[in-house]
Amino acid sequence: MSVEPWASPQDQAAAEHTDRTHTPPSQDQEQHPDKLCLDSFWSEVETIRQGSGYTDLDCTRRDSRQSEEGEQEEQWLADAGLSNLISEDSEDVDNTVLLSTLTRTQAEAVQRRLDSYTLSLRKRNKPAPRDVRDVFTSPITKTLLPESQHSDDLAQNSMASVAKTPLSGCVSRSAMTPEHQRGAPKEEFFITDVSYCEQAVIFLKQAKLPQNNSQRRKEDGTLPRVICPKCRLGVTRIQDLSHADMKKVRQLALIDMTALCDLLELEVKRHKTSKRKTAESPLFGVPLATQLENDQKIKPNTTTPLFLQAMLSFLEKKGVDSEGILRVPGSQSRIKLLQQNLEANFYSGQVSWDEVSPNDAAALLKKFIRELPAPLLTAEYLNTFSAVRDITELKQKLHMLNLLILLLPEPNRNTLKALLEFLSKVISREKRNRMNLWAVATIMAPNLFLHKAVPSRLTEGAEKGHAEKAADVMRLLIRYQDLLWTIPNFLMSQVRKLNENSNRRYQFYDRRIKNLLRKIHTDSRDKPDKNTSELCRTVKIQVGDLVSSTMEYQLTINSRASDLLAQFQRQSVHSPENGKGKMRRNGSVAYPDCALYEVGGNIGEHCLDPDTHLLDLYNSNHGGEWIIKLRPNASRGL
């Protein structure tokens, strides 16, 4: 996976000057693009202040409060799935199952939260919880400790190899282009096999070495191409996992993000928003979860608000080519009438978009985002998103953003993704609309990073640094969104291990059973293995309501999920009435929206990347079934 570079502000300025040579430059056009963008930023802030009915964004501190002493740690432990550590009726096994999957740095982050919580209890004269180390010394959990140490040693060895040769055995040939060898475009390599906090340990050690100080690259405003080497199990995107496994991903991501913040010395305070009166409007000021619940009664399984979908669809058709879209303000009177019309007639389908101005619609889109009762980036993590700008290394910025995206609630994450995809389309039409990446990021940043429910330092004077901080994070979200919406390999490995440990809980209660199973496993390994070229897997087929069968697939070392799907397509000779396929000329049926899933074993349900090497998948999850079925998005449209 790779992402092409964007031009620097200086290059963008030259390009815009070239595009304007055929027209007389106005006074505004003669200004430096960065100056125009920053002016637009503060103009957007002023619009937000006036339109939101409050003149001082900082005066809303009383609407949001930091958690009381000890309350933050208690909430953190609950979000991380470790609330049992401070519960009187906690079970050793429940704690160990999750703790055994953690790296050393992640475990240290958990211990720091427990220590802080213990200190707050002592101040309130309450009994302290147990130490994490006490959990690992219980008789039931001694069997897990060697596994935890072994996995930690593997992580250390992997980090050492990443530090020395980050491309060793990982980068595909297509990534090593002649331009890369000549150093033409700047490139960064995004390694996801090792936890981000453990990578930070290595980076911080290297940064202290004198010979590495001269190698540090100065930031010049450019965003390099980022290459994410594919592992043999393929890329896992957020929508590819079941809800149960995504819950575990969020717990582990929170622990890794907290450990990363500790290493980078980022002090981030979580905020709570007070309950607000429910808006009377069906569209504006309504919580995303509530709006989606209402919309799903109309269109089941929709993942983003229908109103947002309609706005983005209109702007993609009519607005992306409009010069200054998002920057040029619409008419306040027309915007007010449009909002009233939409609130009264949107769900009845009586809204006509023919006479709507794209600039008015763009202004209403921004208003919809900033008038959400809670920030789109959530009150809990809004300040953490803002703090990303204080990180020096680009890879560590992306590490933090990747974890933060995973932590967002599903409605917020899907809405943010839909918005960023639209912003990318705006930037792709830069020659027509005069809106480059920096311009779009600067104008959209206040709408995401300013919210009356969370205090912000962004408005403490019209300082260039504050504007650039928010805009820089915004452009990273836009630029690298395809990368940020993936689940790193190390989290997938931890989820698999967590599921394995949960499935084997009963073994920990009887050492004799565990020893017996270990002996059986050892005996089976001594037996000669079947030749991998002869290994066959039975694949279930569940397409539509009536097509339910199986097929045999022979595995080789080069077999991929795409090859298995191709064989399925060749063998599909059912009539269209028996499924949801499309008739070919030869009478067979194609199922273009099918995917291969692994179900069970050490995973709940996982939609596989077409490039997944199936023999590696089989070795990592012997107990999982392989099922061909329609993707969720495809089944919704049938």
Image (spheres, rainbow, N blue to C red):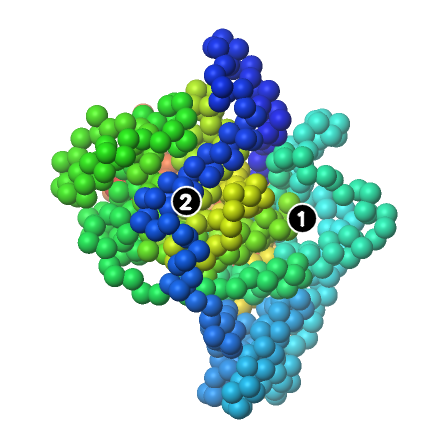
Left or right: 81 with respect to 292? right
The vertical placement of 82 against 313, above or below, is below
Q: Which mark is residue 392?
A: 1
- Say which element carries label 2: helix
The vertical placement of 64 against 42, above or below, is below
Residue name at image x 37 percent, y 23 percent: 322
The spot of residue 178 in percent (x, y) is 71, 26
Residue name at image x 43 percent, y 50 percent: 450
Q: Earlier in the sequence, mark 2 or mark 1?
A: 1
Q: Which mark is residue 447?
A: 2
Amino acid type at mark 2 = Asn
Label 2: how many residues lie within 10 Å, few (<14), some (14-19) or many (20+)? many
Residues 490 and 606: in front is: 490
Left or right: 471 with respect to 154? left
Picture quarter with the C terminus: top left
Q: Is residue 97 visible?
A: yes
Q: CA distance from mark 2 to mark 1?
A: 25 Å
The spot of residue 388 in percent (x, y) is 58, 51
User: Image quadrant of residue 9?
Assistant: top right
Amino acid type at mark 1 = Thr
Residue name at image x 24 percent, y 59 percent: 278
Residues 531 and 281: in front is: 281
Q: Is residue 191 visible?
A: no
